[in-house]
Amino acid sequence: MASGQPLLLVAFIPACEAPPKPGKILVVQPGNFETEGDGKLFRVDPASGTRNILSDFSDPAQGAEGVDPFDVVVEPSGHILVTDSSSGTDKKGVLFRVDAKSGARRILSDFGDQGPLGQNPFGVAVVKERK
């Protein structure tokens, strides 16, 4: 993906979820295939439009590196889940868990290594338990 292309996916965080503050918006920017990186997770203030990088997937100081983050969802705990279709073992994809305060990442599931092997995940959802 060439730089300067529009950001792809947006997740609105409802008021019942934290630690991202209610009404904050998360936007994932896929990586640049030419440089194998540059993917970012932004936090956007809906009132001002101010955008800050929460997690830079090419920064090893924030945890496991990603190549092409694609989808984003917030767990009830407030942790952020991001799929990356080109990272992990044999570049088969991973599911990252991102800390909503620090932007630190860890691999929750590696589609080329853990459990039944998969390939190139593009979506993620959190299912709430029924009471």
Image (tube, rainbow, N blue to C red):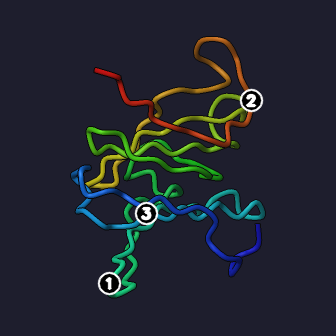
Location of residue 75 (image quadrant): top left
In the depicted structure, whether residue 122 falls above or below residue 92: below
Residue 95 x %, y %: 53, 35
Rendered residue at 61%/44% (across/down): 84
Q: Amino acid at mark 3?
A: Leu
Q: Is residue 58 left or right of residue 128?
A: right
Q: Are marks 1 and 2 in contact (CB under 8 Å)?
A: no
Q: Amino acid at mark 2?
A: Gln
For this orientation, the residue located farthest to the bottom is 48
Q: Amino acid at mark 1?
A: Ala
**Callout 1: SS:** loop
Rendered residue at 38%/30% (across/down): 128
The residue beneath circle 1 is: 47
Rendered residue at 74%/29% (across/down): 119
Q: Is residue 91 left or right of residue 56?
A: right
| Distance in Å between CA atoms under marks 1 and 2 | 38 Å
Mark found first going from the N terminus, 3 or 2: 3
**Callout 2: SS:** loop
Looking at the rendered image, the disc whose residue lies closer to the viewer, 1 or 2, is: 1
Residue 38 x %, y %: 59, 64
The residue beneath circle 3 is: 26
Location of residue 28 (image quadrant): bottom right
The residue beneath circle 2 is: 119
| Distance in Å between CA atoms under marks 1 and 3 | 14 Å
